Image (cartoon, rainbow, N blue to C red):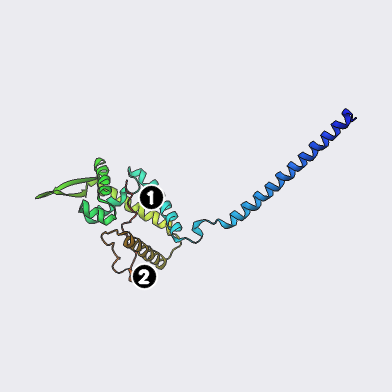
Amino acid sequence: MVSAEERGAVSSGKATSSGASESARTDKAGRDTEVTMGKSDKRIRPPGSKSVGWALVQAARLHRSRVGDRLAALDLFAGQEQVVQALAVAGTMTMGDLAATLRVRPPTASKTISRLAALGFVERRAEAGDGRIVRVRLTDAGLAKAEAIERIWDDVEAEMLDGFDGKERRRLRKLLRKAARNLADVSGVTGHEVDGDADIENDDDEPDALVVPIQGDRLD
């Protein structure tokens, strides 16, 4: 017969063996996980490593955030300044012209105008002889905002292009315009030409100039 002591020793040996096996399996699983993660890390690369679109989106997001922080002091949100800038250049615009200039849908432009009107920065007037046509323009308060916005854009652009020489800035602007035109063509987006679009191939010879930005169909 097997004594209690012998049975205890056998049981203890089995437990030790089981524990060692479990430990070995755990170590192996850990090593397998590390190897898998290592392989995964090598396979997965940030899209920005080779994607122009990713780099463009990141730069645009950071630019929008930086401008938005500065606009908060003017009681404006990022996107609204584009409308103010467009009106500052054109003077008076119809809603259709404004939407086409910014390449957004008319309801988007109309919503932004309503918000700016509530702030006292723009005013709307029906076209004489045709009440269906509404023209918008900046108020005196809006014109003051436009001057402050221009300073903000100049400051942020200087930060963004720090270290770029004049030729590099013109080259970058040219390439971004071509990219925007390509996307507009395939998307069927129509709008007014931005200064320099017609002579985009000769842009390297143009002096630097302020261009009203086009940031898609998101105005606040």
At horizontal 85% and vertical 31% (from top left) the residue drawn is: 8
- Number of the label disc, if any, that sits on residue 90: none
Amino acid, disc 2? Asp
Amino acid, disc 1? Val
**Residue 51 placement, left or right of 98:** right
Q: Is residue 189 above or below residue 207?
A: above
- Image spot of residue 76 (x, y percent): 33, 44
- Image spot of residue 32 (x, y percent): 67, 50
Looking at the rendering, which quadrant does residue 168 occupy?
bottom left
* Number of other residues with Cα within 10 Å of mark 2, as a class: few under 14, some 14 to 19, many 20 or more: some
At horizontal 47% and vertical 60% (from top left) the residue drawn is: 51
Quadrant assignment for the C terminus: top left
Of 36 and 209, which appears nearest the observer? 36
**Residue 19 placement, left or right of 51:** right
* The residue positioned farthest toward the left in the image shown: 129
* Residue, disc 1: 67
* Number of other residues with Cα within 10 Å of mark 1, as a class: few under 14, some 14 to 19, many 20 or more: many
Quadrant assignment for the N terminus: top right
- Number of the label disc, if any, that sits on residue 204: 2
Looking at the rendering, which quadrant does residue 57 occupy?
bottom left
- Image spot of residue 112 (x, y percent): 28, 46
Of 195 and 189, which appears nearest the observer? 189
Of 185 and 147, which appears nearest the observer? 185
Calculate the distance from the C-alpha at mark 1 to the C-alpha at mark 2: 27 Å
SS for callout 1: helix
**Residue 122 placement, left or right of 73:** left
* The residue positioned farthest toward the front in the image shown: 1
- Image spot of residue 39 (x, y percent): 61, 55
* The residue positioned farthest toward the top in the image shown: 4
Total number of numbered labels?
2
Q: Earlier in the sequence, mark 1 or mark 2?
A: 1
